[in-house]
Amino acid sequence: MAMKENHGEVYWRFNAFHRFIHLVMMVTFIGLALTGLPLKYPGAFWAEGLMSLWGGVKGAGILHRWCAGVTFGYFALHLFWVVYYLAVLKGGLLGPHSMVPSRKDFLDLCQHIRYFLGNGSPPQFDRFTYWEKFDYWAVFWGIAFIGGSGLLLWFPEFFSRFLPGFFLNIAYTIHSDEALLATGFIFVVHIFNAHLRANVFPMDKSIFTGKVEAKKIIEHHPLEWEYLNQHPERKEKRKVRRDLLVLFFVVFMGGLLPAFSLARGLTDEEIMEAEKKLCWRCHRQPNLNSNEGVTASILFCLDCHGKKDAKKKVEGKTVSVYIDPKEYGKTVHRRISCIRCHDGIASSPHRTLRFNCASCHGYHGEGTAHDPHRTVHCEACHHESKEVMKDPKTGKIVLLKVKEGMPLQMTSHRLADFKNQKACEKCHFTENQLGAPVRVLPAKSLICIECHSASITLNDPISIITLLLFLGGIGMNLSLWFRGTIGDPSFSAHEKVSYLAEKVWQVIFSKKILTLLKVLVIDVLLLRRVLKESLSRWTIHTFIYLPFFLRFFIGLILLILSRCFPMSPEIALWLDKNHPPIAFIYDLLGLCVIIGVGGATMRRLQKTFRNRPSAGQDMIVLTLLGAILITGFIVEGLRILLTGVPPSIALYSFIGYPLSLFLGLLPIRWEWVYPYGWTVHAILTGLFIIYLPFSKMFHILVSPLVLLVHSVTKEK
């Protein structure tokens, strides 16, 4: 069919979504290039000016990662568009209008080469040329290699858990060289093909405006124009109409501009972090992931510190900084380069930040040292020096650097021996002024997990006895269940277990699992059936049951996250008992339980409940619950009092903090009392757990199970 050449018509070539993606890609790519290349070539004459523009190395790193995050975002957005195009718009993955290369593209390339050599005519292109498809797939190539290697360098601690160290070296080479290749390709090849070649010079505006004249389509994409004339309905859909590209640009720039403020106002620590790279301008940094690199780094430091006359001034006093190479060779860190721990030391002036031990070792859990010790610096415990103090500014326990006006020598790299509790006695002793208990307490174990961020351990007699007796009670109940029979013939216990296991398997891998989840939320957690019976009973149950479940759920989630991400400072923060949201939530949930226990007690003192057969059991359980909550709040108040939590933080513990103020008025050595209060709280918790299988309150565990079974078996 002959083409209808109406040169006055204007059509859409790119819709608003594609132009927005291209605009974001263009801005972020330029941002990545301008912040990454100065890091690759710090000695170049132009690098210093760019670094000062971004606020130094730290500011350039912030902007570089920000642009990288946006890059991953628009890449994911485009993948969603591809899925939408294929699934909803019913577009084709292959064909003349697809970005997937075809046999025709290869033939067009060959024809173009022949044309350049003066042999034949130029090829006839469809909607996309072979070089446009190459540019498109180059983005996928670049994000896969540059983005993937960048992620390894961005989160080295995470990837080092399952990848060997030399992968970081490979990632650095790929990220650096591939990024340089991509920059050269974009600014030389792509810019020329898209804007500077003969028929489009000085610029092809269609990627910015979305519009293209019919004359341009006929000239550059004749096969597409032929297709549009063969399908007039497609022509109408391609007619130009207004869109919101300007708004997209304004929104994007609104998000970009605040990022520049992150590069301003750097602290001294951030400036020092940036300056540490200056030493490597003259002294080539060794590969710290190899044995040779580690040895070279250590010898470089021992060149000065290995001399016995090495000294420094601390508060006007001279102190030795000599390190005995033989003694250092016996330490656990003898195969770790010095600059791994002494971060920032390779700078001028020669100084270091505080050690960040958690960057390699992760953070303590409850079971490691009987407590996370969030208010204690690592070196205060692990350094062999016994001189520690409470920092008056932060309230944290730190290693003492100066004693009675004399600086202490800190060059020993031997660590304290924690095979016994002797090392803990630097804080936990009778006359300590640190707020530590006079004796080391056990870790919060498995029996504490229903209320606390505990550990899966059993390292004290109370926990072991409690768990054994509780499992014994559960076993007795299960034996009664499996000995019982309904109907004839009866089944053996083995047959019952097999039948139960088969039914559980069938439910999990069927649609009934959705019904199970619905019942779990509505009937088990929200107590719908109890609400239908009595509003007052539902209120009391909710005040007791739901807070226990929420505290258990929070503790379990934090336990799992701490095991999966031991290096994460954010998760370590949420494991801190003094963290404001955690302190407030735990006190609020504890208060709800006390209200619920009080309501249940008042109800059982009424005449209608007093003569019930289970009234005695109910009062025992309620008494234990009340005692557990009261002793728990007292222990919390003592902890806040002894550790000296600042009022601005302690205020969020709106029950524990007032108790600590009241207890502080009493002339009692609370560091002596605290271990006994902790022990009483643990014993009461153990008694409650032991008594649970033998009391009426066992329905806390049984009723949800019965409801779930009924929901999938349709029994009423």
Image (cartoon, rainbow, N blue to C red):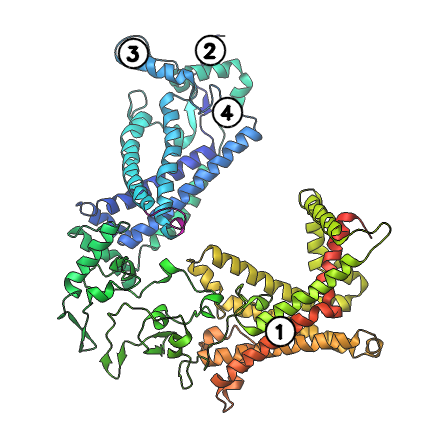
> Disc 1 or 2, which lies upstream in sequence?
2
Give the answer, above or below, for where 525 lies relative to 395.
above
Horizontal and vertical percent position of residue 192:
29, 27
Q: Is residue 447 left or right of residue 618?
A: left
Q: Nearer the viewer, mark 1 or mark 2?
A: 1
Give neighbour class at mark 4: few <14, some 14-19, many 20+ (Cα, 10 Å). few
Name the residue beneath numbered marker 2. 3
Task: Kindly identify the residue that appears in the image at 48 percent across and 19 percent down.
Answer: 95
Q: Distance of mark 4 from mark 2, alpha carbons?
A: 27 Å
Mark 2 residue element: loop
Report the amino acid beneath label 4. Answer: Leu
Helix, strand or loop at mark 1: helix
Q: CA distance from mark 1 to mark 4?
A: 63 Å
What count of labels does the image hold?
4
Task: Tell which circle, 2 or 3, labels the residue nearer the N-terminal end.
Answer: 2
Write down the residue under mark 3.
114
Residue at horizontal 59 percent and vertical 65 percent from the top: 551
Name the residue at 30% across, 54% down.
Answer: 58
Tell me which label, 1 or 3, sits earlier in the chain.
3
- The residue that mark 1 highlights is 685
Would you name the residue on which mark 4 appears? 93
Mark in front: 4 vs 2: 4
Residue 8 image position (x, y, % from top left) = 43, 19
9 sits to left or right of 39? right
The span picked out in magenta is 158-165
